[in-house]
């Protein structure tokens, strides 16, 4: 699962946000780095209150299209090789989204300036409603905090305003809670900031609860186009 985000307020704040190039600059850098992060995904599937399946998965975009996703454990134990191979084959056959410019994802004209100081600036940033998202964009809220002196992304927060249905109504997103902070970067390169914090999501699929959690973010050095 990936994550995207929303709006509020009135004309003065909207105009101030729309005229601020810093937000666009940081969003473009963020999008360009999207396929440079590896992470661990923990998935728990429930039947009532009982966990019936649990997986730990690792995503590394530089491992090549056939090895981007690896199954690290299944139900608390190393997976049987044949099972892991079949799972990874299905997972890695999923089509990757093409990276486009940030304006195709985010509606900068409706961004809201929430706070501004010499040290940092914070925006509420809506998603573009015209993009073919798999969820209603007006239900998802994104807040971005930028460290002004280094022009670096400092914090990303996301949540949903209320549950909503996806996948032709077969699944329902109950909760998204994302609060990721970037550790202070070396002065020489703001892009070297490291993310900490948490990101979780809860959905129901055909009536069964599924919980997702993401951790162990690692910035990978090799561009994905060189990993085949």
Image: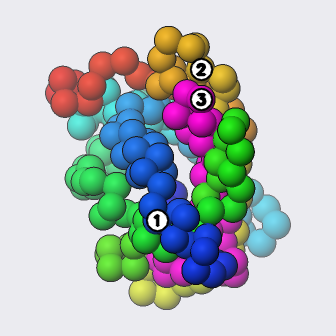
| Residue behind mark 3 | 149
Bin the neighbour count of mark 2 within 10 Å (Cα to Cα): few under 14, some 14-19, many 20 and up: some
Whole-percent x and y of residue 206?
56, 80
Q: Secondary structure at mark 3?
A: loop
Please report the bounds of the magenta region as a residue range. Answer: 135-163
Does any portion of residue 48 appear in the rendered image? yes
Q: Image point 46% across, 31% down: which residue?
A: 38
Spot the residue most to the bottom.
169
Whole-percent x and y of residue 136?
49, 81
Task: Please determine whether, in this image, residue 175 is positioned above or below residue 201.
Answer: below
Q: Image point 70% across, 36% down: which residue?
A: 119
Q: Mark 1 or 2, which is nearer the eye?
A: 1
Q: Work out whether mark 2 precedes mark 3 in sequence or the reverse, and give the earlier one.
A: 3
Does any portion of residue 83 appear in the rendered image? no
Bin the neighbour count of mark 3 within 10 Å (Cα to Cα): few under 14, some 14-19, many 20 and up: few
Q: Work out whether mark 1 precedes mark 2 in sequence or the reverse, and give the earlier one.
A: 1
The image's mark for residue 18 is: 1
| Residue behind mark 2 | 185
């Amino acid at each position: 699962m990936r994550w995207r985000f929303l709006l509020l307020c009135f004309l003065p704040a909207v105009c101030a946000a729309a005229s601020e190039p810093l937000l666009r600059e940081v969003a473009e850098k963020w999008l360009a780095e999207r396929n440079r992060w590896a992470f661990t995904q923990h998935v728990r599937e429930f039947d009532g209150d009982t966990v019936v399946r649990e997986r730990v998965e690792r995503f590394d975009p530089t491992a090549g299209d056939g090895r981007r996703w690896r199954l690290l454990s299944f139900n608390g134990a190393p997976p049987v090789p044949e099972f892991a191979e079949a799972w990874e084959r299905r997972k890695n056959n999923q089509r990757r989204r093409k990276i486009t410019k940030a304006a195709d994802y985010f509606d900068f004209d409706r961004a809201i300036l929430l706070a501004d100081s010499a040290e940092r600036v914070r925006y509420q940033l809506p998603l573009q409603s015209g993009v073919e998202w798999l969820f209603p964009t007006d239900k998802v809220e994104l807040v971005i905090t930028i460290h002004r002196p280094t022009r670096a992304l400092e914090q990303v927060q996301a949540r949903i305003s209320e549950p909503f249905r996806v996948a032709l109504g077969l699944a329902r997103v109950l909760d998204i809670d994302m609060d990721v902070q970037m550790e202070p970067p070396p002065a020489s390169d703001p892009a070297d900031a490291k993310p900490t914090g948490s990101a979780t999501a809860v959905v129901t699929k055909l009536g069964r609860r599924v919980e997702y959690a993401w951790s162990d973010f690692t910035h990978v050095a090799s561009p994905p186009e060189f990993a085949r």
